[in-house]
Image: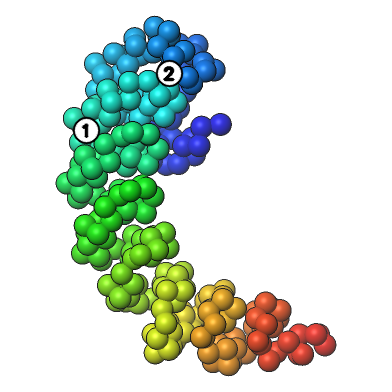
Amino acid sequence: MNKYLFESDYSADSLRWIRKREELKIINHPFSKKNLEDVPELDALQEEIINANDSALSYFFAMEYPYKTYKMQKVILDNKDAKYAFLFAQNIRNCDIKALQRLVMESKKTKYICKFGCFVKNADRKPLENIVIKSRNVKYAHMWLKHVKESNVDKFKDIIISSGKPRYLFELAKHLTQPEDICIIEDLIIQSKSFTYMRLLAEKIKSSNIEKLEQAVLDSDNVNEIKKFAKYVRRSKMKKFFLVL
């Protein structure tokens, strides 16, 4: 099954490609370059895509048939299509990553700028990171921290802390070393009343204050959450209590 069929960004285009491919009856053709050169339908389909100036079908063609992919890349570059420039750079061998990155950066679309930096091998990440930081978009700050090992954590810290969102705070905690920073995150997650992330902090972050998090759960008087905390947090003092229930 086409992996883009259920992605909101690409599902409609993916269905168009499936229909086009079925129409031409070239679905199961071998992927060797020698064999592909002997398939006249491919040249005809490329010409149709070029004439239609269709970025989506250009990408799906190149993804499925490694045949004259430079022609398909040109369609995407000429259209300045950031959405498909990202996918092309991520998945198509021997593409021009520099040209595709330049297009994505010039688009000023933070979503694809961030994805390019996170998921494109050999991307020049520094200028992409700077754009994500300047956007102050917590969703993409979180994505960058999660997927880019060499990310500048200090520059993302304020963006994520100011959001107060437990999911993003927990991801940030994985990258921090200073006790005072962990303390701030603990307090914010306790304030959010997210039992899931109180438990995950205690379970996964070695430098977390187990007693503080445990007390917050106890103060809730939520028996189910108290049991979960005791069960999953190895250092919890409530384990004995849990075992006798």
Q: Left or right of 204: which side holds 50? A: left
Q: Which of pointers 1 and 2 indicates the residue nearer the eye?
A: 2
Classed neighbour count for the residue bearing mark 1: other residues with Cα under 10 Å, few (<14), some (14–19), many (≥20): some
State the separation of the CA atoms marked 1 and 2. 24 Å
Q: Helix, strand or loop at disc 1? A: helix
The residue under the point 42% across, 22% down is 65
Identify the image quadrant of the C terminus.
bottom right
Residue toward you, 25 or 70 = 70
How is the structure coloured here?
Answer: rainbow
Count neighbours of disc 2 (C-alpha within 10 A) and say few if under 14, some if 14 to 19, many if 20 or more: few
Residue 140 percent coordinates (x, y): 34, 60
Q: How many marks?
A: 2
Residue highlighted by disc 2: 33
Give the answer, above or below, for where 41 lies relative to 69: above
Residue at the image point whose x is 44% and y is 35% from the top: 11
Q: Residue under circle 1?
A: 77
Q: From the viewer's perspective, is 213 left or right of 106? A: right
Instruction: Tell me the quadrant of the picture where the N terminus can be found.
Output: top right
> Residue 59: horizontal and vertical position, in percent?
35, 30
Amino acid at the residue labelled 1: Leu
6 w.r.t. 235: above or below:
above
Badge 2 element? helix
Amino acid type indicated by mark 2: Lys
Residue farthest toward the right in the current orientation of the protein? 244
